Image: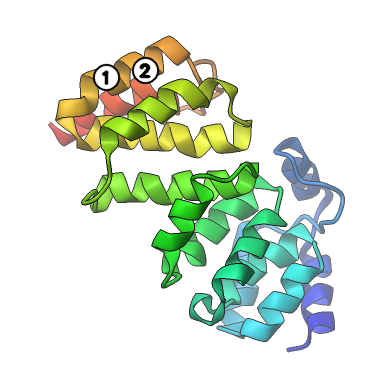
Amino acid sequence: MTIAEVLKQLEAAGSEKMRLHNKKYGAGDNQFGVKMGDIRNIANKIKTDHELGLALWETGNIDARFLAALIINPKQLSIGEVDSIVCTNRFAHVADWLSSYVIKEHPDKEELRERWMKSEDAMAARAGWSLTAGRVTRNHEGIDITALLDRIEKEMPIAPTETQWTMNTTLAQIGINHPQFRERALAIGERLGVFRDYPTSKGCTSPFAPIWINEMVKRQG
């Protein structure tokens, strides 16, 4: 399938309703407004096509970038290419797909995590904290959790919203998965108040760290 054919399919599947939805969450005008399920259906037809994925990414189109995240082969990307992809994106929802389908599958993700944790680029820092949230959840060996809490307490109030989101995720995962740090994680969340008033749909858990931590701990019990 050529890039022209893919873009034509994406355009045909787009809707004004979805374009407005994307704009509400920070997307620009370079989009067709394709539902996530339709993007996945197109990806299922293509399977993996690394070069096509890179070409789609370069268009800057939001829907094309969602699709690119699904068909790129992470193992064929150099560290520099991953870094460039992360830093040329400014839409948080695309960043989440990149994290799930590309970054987490990259063989050098730990080196990238350490680099991005020091970055002044909001989306790179977001990616670094996302990887760190995964580390404190599943494999925290070599991670200084006290130092992470120190950074979160100091930096999260002044961090860009994009970065705050995954810093907050890291805080919540520390509180959920590490009982010895739970009291401090709860205290930091309460004092900072980040996402305290975040609108939450019925049946969903608030991203406000103290609510999130307590709810998940209760479920574990």
The residue shown at (24%, 53%) is 139
For badge 1, the amino acid type reads Arg
- With respect to residue 203, does 20 lie above or below? below
Crowd tier of the residue under label 1, counting other residues whose Cα lies within 10 Å: few below 14, some 14–19, many 20 or above? some
- With respect to residue 157, does 118 lie above or below? below
Residue 206, visible in the rendered structure? no
Furthest residue in direction left, as rendered: 221
Residue 188 image label: 2
Q: Quadrant of residue 2?
A: bottom right
Residue 171, visible in the rendered structure? yes
Q: Do tag 2 and tag 1 residues touch (Cβ < 8 Å)?
A: yes
Number of on-image labels: 2
- x and y, in percent, of residue 149 in the image: 34, 28
- x and y, in percent, of residue 128 in the image: 48, 49
In this image, 203 relative to 145: left or right? Answer: right
For badge 2, the amino acid type reads Ile
- With respect to residue 123, does 10 lie above or below? below
In this image, 59 relative to 171: left or right? Answer: right
Crowd tier of the residue under label 2, counting other residues whose Cα lies within 10 Å: few below 14, some 14–19, many 20 or above? many
Q: CA distance from mark 2 to mark 1?
A: 6 Å
- x and y, in percent, of residue 62 in the image: 75, 58
Which residue has dot 1 on it? 184
Nearer to us in this view, 148 or 202: 148
